[in-house]
Amino acid sequence: MFERLKTKLKKFTEKVESIVRKKEEQAKAEVVEEAAEETPKIAEKTQETVREEEKAEELPATAAVSALEEREAAPPAVEKKVEEKKREEAKKAEGGVRRKLGVKEKLKAVFKLEAFLDERDLDAALSDFEEDLLESDVALPVAEAIISNVKEALLGKRRKIGENVSKIVLEALKEALLNVFPEGFDFEEFVRVREKPVKIVFVGVNGTGKTTTIAKIAYFLKERGFSVVLASADTYRTGAVEQLEKHADALNIKVIKHRYGADPAAVVYDAVKYAEAHKKDVVLADTAGRMHTNVNLMEQLRKICRVTRPDLVIFVDEAIAGNDAVERARIFDEYVGIDASILTKADMDVKGGSAISIAYITSKPILFLGTGQKYGDLVKFDPKEFVERILA
């Protein structure tokens, strides 16, 4: 899953790493250049010191004796000045040695230098990265948010030359991606602590696997000890009731249904009353798949939610639908206020951008990913695991 997104993230990491390596080479070259400029000056000063020492050694013995006599005859103040002058000359000679060492140390310091990325370094890489995100079905506002987060994390980031660049970039990407997702949501714990029966309404367009997803959720809950009743509130699509009944028979679950054309809100209401009377834990309501552009059907969905006051409204769509799924999620959220999403066919999704985009656009968590046709093919969505996987 999500192979394209993985590839694009790796490509960005390698590009930034290349930029940083060039910065390192530039920094090393500058240090070497500075060292080369200073070396002749130091050599010249060292030669002057040597010449002065040779001159002192060439003084005739008489001159040396005369100088010694003069020093002995000199008053204490003059002798003190002579000693101070000698100390100053000694310090100068020592300074030449220190400067020599300074050049060597400076050359060694190349490997301890700090390098950092400025805006000019990052602009080209981030521009390409934004295009790559868009190609991976990441919606434009989401891509812009990720780019902004990555830029903030990397801009001016100081690092020792030779330090692992990939690690720094991956940490920036990880933080940027996690910031896109809302806080996590523990579906099982929510059902466990909520007042019973817990009412859950599923919404979405036709053909996205909504009814099959409801059956998977029923299986998930039954496996964890919860009792479930289904509400067949899709009273429009021919075969919808029979499809849900087939799943219910396989799972040994009760279905509440009315005739075709009946009020779907009444079906959900009756299912809730049945659950209350029979001490059932959860009501899962299937609604008619409707295009998000059909205002009348969207208003009817509002009525279902108004009458039944569900504890959760879950939006279901295909991971492979890309930006179409993102737009549908946004409109369903505007009309009925979705609480979470489930993405089907995630096992067929090579891009991976839909999950990121829907979570960001709706500010609601992704609960599960559908990964097949079997009832157990439902994977809990964990943002941290998702990010770790695409960055692996």
Image: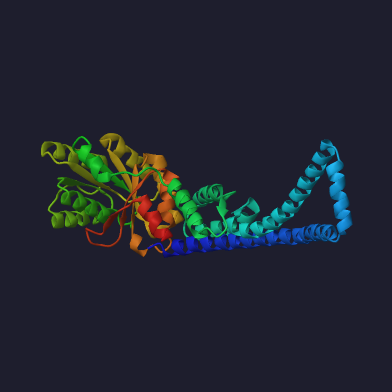
Q: Position of residue 26 (x, y in %)?
A: 66, 61
Is residue 124 something that shows in the picture? no
Which quarter of the picture shows residue 122? bottom right
Percent across and percent down for residue 162 are 55, 60
**Image spot of residue 335 (x, y percent):** 39, 40
Nearest to the observer: residue 108 or residue 328: 108
Q: Write the residue at 41% across / 64% down.
A: 350
Pick the front one: 129 or 158: 158
From the top left corner, tell me how far across and down residue 203 is, in percent: 32, 47
Quarter occupied by residue 250: bottom left
Comparing 214 with 131, the one in front is 131
Could you say which is closer to the camera, residue 83 or residue 353? 83
Coloring applied to the structure: rainbow
| Residue reaching furthest to the left | 278
Residue at image x 85%, y 61%? Answer: 58
Q: Quadrant of the N terminus?
A: bottom left
- In the image: residue 349, left or right of residue 219: right
